Amino acid sequence: MTQTPLDPTPTSRSGLRGWLLAAVAVAALVAFFALLPTPKADRPAADAAATDLPSDTFAVVGVRLFDGERVLPRCDVLVRDGRVAAVAEHLEIPSGVPTVDGAGRTLLPGLLDAHVHTWGDSLADALRFGVTTVFDMFTDPQYAAEVRRRQAADGNPGAADLFTAGLLATVAGGHGTQFPIRVPTVDPGVDADAWVAARLAEGSDYVKIILEDGSSLGHPIPTLSAARVAELAAAAHRHGVLAVAHVGSAAEARLAMEAGVDGLVHLFLDADPGVGTTGSVAHSIADAGAFVVPTLTVLESLAGGHGGAELADDPRLAAALSREQSGQLRRTFGLPPQPGLSLDNALDTTRRLATLGVPILAGSDAPNPGTAFGASLHRELELLVTAGLTPVEALTAATSAPADAFGLDDRGRVAPGLRADLLLVAGDPTTDVTATRDRVAVWKLGRPAPLQASEPDAAPGAAAPAVEAGLVSDFDDGLSARRGAGWQVSTDRRMHGESTAEIAAVDGHLQVTGEIAAGFPFPWAGAIYFPGDAPMQPVDLSALGGVAFRARGAGGPFRLMLLGAAQGGMPATASFAAGDDWRRVVVPLADLPADLDQVGAVLFSGGPGLGPFRLEIDDVELLASDADGGQR
């Protein structure tokens, strides 16, 4: 019997084609995970800290104020009907208005995260950490439309506000197309003006353009030409919206400036060959009048840093992190070191940009590995200070600077008439920027937000029962399993997708037939096995070496996924091939970036390619580990 070679997982592939779009995969897959057949407690509307706070009309008295631009050592702030009514060193507070003691505390505008990828509950997660507005850089337009409907109806008080690019501009085979997401590519013959108009009709607030050829990561991919980027940027401007660019290198950043984009939503890890000269990329950005979202947090993770894990261990944030968020912060991209790529290059470029007066905007790029919604913006603030910004400049990057860059005049500052999107923290973040993590209160439109994750998510889970090695199913007795809750069919129809599957025991093996169809950003269809006593009940596989099975099929390649709540919502995935003849496949668990002590399910799925498929598997077993970590 032969072992099928495994494709590397998206988080371990050297070069990692389109690494930043992992966020989109996470978005879809978290939704997938959330809708698997497992009980889930309802989240409370607010925790005690939130319900004890005044709402809509109140005053914060005797507080240090960072108003989005400057620091006022002692101030009173009056909020009336969800808006800031008055700001002064001393106010006469109207009788009956509740007050919040600001002594020893600092009041800031609600934070703005200038680069995320949203889905599901991510906006509620962000709000717990004081992030009251996010700028999404690639998400499902239908999801965004529903969020915007809630914002228009009642302000969506339990979640951060959303502004979005919707779908991004790229070419066939380029960054953004590595998953079967229905992205209308800007190929030869596609009219740039019509493409932009279609995005705006879907509800996009601005246009995101891809200019990354993969060369800096050693994996060339197609990308838009600089001339094409210029056409798209000009079309966006004709329609009255901003054009922002995703780049992967210093050279691409310079090309983006020449093409006329308004801002960069990433910096880069390679060195700028023009540093110290008037032709450097920093000078070209400054000369263009563009803004920059460095996303140092995700670049740190990509470069092999562990700032996310350090954030997860910060006691000021721990109670606000769901188990899923904590797991996501501890994940890494798993890339080997890349010659010439270093976080120091991004930090140095950020410092040079700030010195030249380029507007710096704080953005986390959550939920990539090593990041989590809301929490990671606090790490971004710390990294901006590491790069050379003062704490006040870093706070500006997360408040008034993004509001100004994206043309929002109702937030990002604490001033009369503006929204009462507010963050009250203990201590003084204008001297120690990490004090933003010590949250006392968060208000959105004057309404208090929860400060802690709901108890079912935040509470440490009991140790999961260990599973011993051995045969799981040989399908001689139908779909039964020798351990666990057994087998079920699973498809993306849970998320209103169009994929289909049927499973049956046929001649002593499991047969899965179906079709992977467009209609959901990350389509799937297949057979799911629950190793616990109930669906998605976690078990401990950490003492095991791998999963083995015999397989044959057509329409592959296929995917094996491990699912669990502690994985930050991202299933660990390995691809495998199956042809006309039976072959034995071994998937080493060490190759899957999962929390093996909290595995809820194993999914055998078609895709990611679209079309009909047939997968047959037999003799599924869990392998014990040898002393050297191999399988026997």
Image: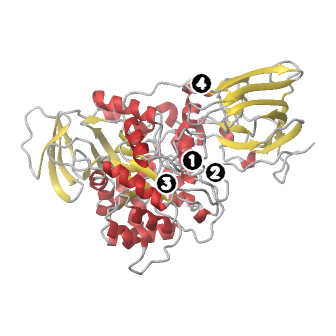
Distance from Cα at disc 3 to Cα at disc 4: 30 Å
Amino acid of disc 1: Ala
Answer with mark 2 or mark 3, whichever residue precedes in sequence: 2
Distance from Cα at disc 3 to Cα at disc 1: 15 Å
Residues marked 2 and 1 touching at CB (< 8 Å): yes
The circle drawn on residue 22 is 1
Answer left or right for 618 relative to 353: right
Answer with mark 4 or mark 1, whichever residue precedes in sequence: 1
User: Which tag is nearer the camera, tag 3 or tag 1?
Assistant: 3
Residue 342: x and y in percent read 55, 68
Q: Which residue is mark 3?
A: 210
User: Which tag is nearer the camera, tag 2 or tag 4?
Assistant: 4
Distance from Cα at disc 2 to Cα at disc 1: 8 Å
Q: Which residue is mark 4?
A: 493
Amino acid of disc 3: Ile
Residues marked 3 and 1 touching at CB (< 8 Å): no
The residue at 9%/40% (across/down) is 93
Residue 123: x and y in percent read 41, 38
